[in-house]
């Protein structure tokens, strides 16, 4: 069972991470150790070559990993990204981008996870992302 609801997580990112709203990112599902997000297609995110810009894809992956971590530990706003690595696998289509994240390891101070990004309606991922979050000590 998730330690944070979809509504509570969406309210948190809407209030504290306004950049997420500019990218059109919405929370679909958060479970214990997994999350799904959606970035609505916006022609303003297209870069030369007709592909969705890498920074937008990285933002989607990062916020998905944040949802994965908070799904495990609850609302800990100061859990922060310490590393994020993205491998672009293929050109995303000009449609919504879907993110599926999961936890790989949760420790006392670090959480490691991965996110796969997909163009809506396509089976093969467009990017594979791994990341680490720092978890502040509990008081």
Image (cartoon, helix red, strand yellow):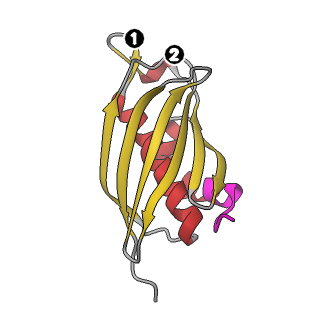
Q: Are marks 1 and 2 in contact (CB under 8 Å)?
A: yes
Residue marked by disc 1: 50
Q: Residue at x 33, y 10 (%)?
A: 49
Q: Which mark is residue 94?
A: 2
Element under disc 1: loop
Left or right, 123 with reference to 129? right
**Quadrant where the image shows the N terminus:** bottom right
Label 2 crowd bin: few (<14), some (14–19), many (20+), radius 10 Å: some
Up/down of 90 relative to 66, above or below: above
Q: Tag 2 or tag 1, which sits nearer the N-term?
A: 1
The stretch drawn in magenta includes residue 102:
no
Q: Residue at x 44, y 24 (%)?
A: 45
Q: Which mark is residue 126?
A: none
Which of the 4 image quarters holds residue 55?
A: top left
Range shown magenta: 1-10
Question: Which x, y percent locates residue 22?
Answer: 50, 37
User: In this view of the protein, can residue 11 be seen by the observer?
Assistant: yes
Question: Which x, y percent locates residue 5?
Answer: 69, 61
Q: Residue at x 70, y 56 (%)?
A: 7
Question: Which x, y percent locates residue 10?
Answer: 63, 53
Up/down of 123 relative to 29, above or below: above
Label 1 crowd bin: few (<14), some (14–19), many (20+), radius 10 Å: few
């Amino acid at each position: 069972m998730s330690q944070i609801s979809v509504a509570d997580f969406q309210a948190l990112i809407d209030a504290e991470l306004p950049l997420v709203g500019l990218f059109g990112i919405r929370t679909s599902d958060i479970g214990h150790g997994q999350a799904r997000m959606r970035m609505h297609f916006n022609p303003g995110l297209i870069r030369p070559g007709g592909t969705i810009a890498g920074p937008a894809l990285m933002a989607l992956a990062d916020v998905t990993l944040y949802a994965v971590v908070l799904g495990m530990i609850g609302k800990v706003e100061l859990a922060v990204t310490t590393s994020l690595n993205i491998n672009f696998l293929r050109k995303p289509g000009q449609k919504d981008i879907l993110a599926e994240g999961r936890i790989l390891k949760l420790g006392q101070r670090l959480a490691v996870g991965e996110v796969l990004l997909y163009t809506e309606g396509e089976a093969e991922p467009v990017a594979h992302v791994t990341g680490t979050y720092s978890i502040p000590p509990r008081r």
